[in-house]
Image (cartoon, rainbow, N blue to C red):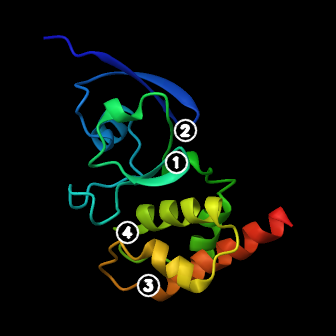
Amino acid sequence: MTQPTIRLAVNGRIHDISAAPDTALLYVLRNDLELNGPKYGCGLGECGTCTVLIDGLAARSCVIPISGCVGRDIVTLEGLGTRDRPDPVQEAFIAEQAAQCGYCLNGMIMTTKALLMRTPHPSETEVLEALRYNLCRCGAHVEIIRAAMRAAGRLAEAHD
């Protein structure tokens, strides 16, 4: 049986995907588009490792069917910046060495990016609230919060 073709806009490019409409976005991103920023964690949308931006909002790609993404702008970790020109959030995470095992890193960066897009000058409490549903197993919480606050400062400077 032939699968329908679903058109997705990912990282500024249009992709025609042949897959069942109820296929989780995460599987298409990783398997079809070879974008490995979003990780498979829990498969239930609870840990945050699969987080992407959909129309600028943090979304758990493991529980979102591709049919719900048609006509929407999807951005993965790979779409934020490059090795030579990382996004300010990526730069902040590098500067603060806000990673140990890397399990949570994608979700923490993407959730921070979404927060800063809607709240360029968040308080530490707002950062903690935004990141509270992202699971970090190795205890890099202090560095992650510092990185988010550093990114907020850098982005605030760019907007002022």
Pointer 3 residue:
141
Q: CA distance from mark 2 to mark 1?
A: 8 Å
Task: Give the quarter of the figure containing the C terminus.
Answer: bottom right
Residue drawn where x is 51% and y is 84% of the image: 143
Residue drawn where x is 62% and y is 50% of the image: 82
Give amino acid for label 1. Answer: Glu
Give amino acid for label 3. Answer: His
Give amino acid for label 4. Answer: Cys
Residue 105 location in percent, x, y? Answer: 43, 67
Pointer 4 residue:
104
Q: Earlier in the sequence, mark 3 or mark 1?
A: 1
Secondary structure beneath dot 2 equals: loop
Q: Categorize mark 1 by other alpha carbons within 10 Å: few (<14), some (14-19), many (20+).
A: some
In this view, which residue lies farthest toward the top? 2
Q: CA distance from mark 4 to mark 3?
A: 10 Å
Secondary structure beneath dot 1 equals: helix
CB-based contact (under 8 Å), mark 2 and mark 1: yes
Residue 11 location in percent, x, y? Answer: 54, 38
Give amino acid for label 2. Answer: Asn
Residue 69 shows in this picture: yes
Residue 94 location in percent, x, y? Answer: 58, 72
Pointer 2 residue:
11
CB-based contact (under 8 Å), mark 1 and mark 4: no
Q: CA distance from mark 3 to mark 1?
A: 23 Å
Q: Categorize mark 2 by other alpha carbons within 10 Å: few (<14), some (14-19), many (20+).
A: some
Q: Is residue 25 left or right of residue 117?
A: left
CB-based contact (under 8 Å), mark 4 and mark 3: no
Q: Earlier in the sequence, mark 1 or mark 4?
A: 1
Residue 14 location in percent, x, y? Answer: 51, 24
Q: CA distance from mark 4 to mark 2?
A: 21 Å
Pointer 1 residue:
78
